[in-house]
Image (cartoon, rainbow, N blue to C red):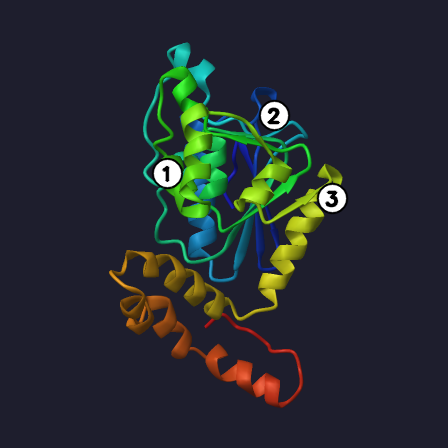
Amino acid sequence: MADYEFVKTETDGNLFIITINRPDVMNACHPPTNDELENAFDSFAENDDLWVAIITGAGDRAFSAGNDLKYQAEGGKMWRPKKGFGGITSRFDLNKPVIAAVNGVAMGGGFEIALACDIILASDNAIFALPEPRVGLLAAAGGVHRLPRSIPLKQAMGMMLTGRRVPAAEGMALGFVNEVVPQAELMDAARRWAAQILECSPLSVRATKDAAYAGFNEDSLQAAIETVYPGMAAMRDSEDFIEGPKAFAEKRPPNWKGR
């Protein structure tokens, strides 16, 4: 793995953990951080032995406060990351699951990073918001599109038009948070979710993610059901497609190979 200044990575078997490591600025992301996150997610996407990722923030105050506005205001050099904010918000070809372990504030771009993940787990002190209208901006890294696709439209508009802060418990009630746990237990919970995913066929998981998201682009439910997505074809052509039923018949745990 590459050496990073603003990001930490850890590999544990088939699990990859990415930590935004700027706790002194509440893990706000400036362009160099975005570049490192993009590189880390590239490494995850390209490594066949990595099946699930967790992204979190360093420290106990923030997942990410979003764009580093102080860096921008001081005239820091700005550029747009190719794969979006946090290296993930415009990454539409990643069929491996990503879990956001939100350990505090997730504001603006930080919330958009979490929304770009497949599962959001939150510590009990987590706070979510898209406050861009309060500073004359727009949650253009996917927030204005992903939030209304994650929760009822009126609830999403209520959050986005006011920029109000939503605590973890309300986030779970609204439906964009999967589980709320005490902060000290957050990473254990994230590893528990990851372990449950890792019990499944990695190619089946990828086919599921592929079909679920791509199906939204079809004109009808019938079209979505009748389409064979690339992940489905890869699953059906794999060794694991035989191993799963064979392990079930032999009453033993499957030995997934991811191919």
Looking at the picture, does residue 125 appear above or below residue 42?
above
Q: Secondary structure at mark 3?
A: helix
Can you identify the residue that label 2 sits on? 23
Residue 138 percent across, percent down from the top left: 35, 26
Q: Secondary structure at mark 1?
A: loop
Q: Secondary structure at mark 2?
A: helix
Q: Amino acid at mark 2?
A: Pro
Q: 18 and 172: which one is in front?
A: 172
Looking at the picture, does residue 235 appear above or below residue 109?
below
Can you identify the residue that label 3 sits on? 185
Residue 141 vs residue 151: left or right?
left
Labels 2, 3: front one: 3
Q: Amino acid at mark 3?
A: Glu
Can you identify the residue that label 1 sits on? 142
Quadrant position of the C terminus in the picture: bottom left
Looking at the picture, does residue 53 appear above or below residue 59?
below
Label 2 – label 3 distance at C-alpha: 19 Å
Q: Say whether disc 2 or disc 3 marks the residue closer to the N-terminus.
A: 2
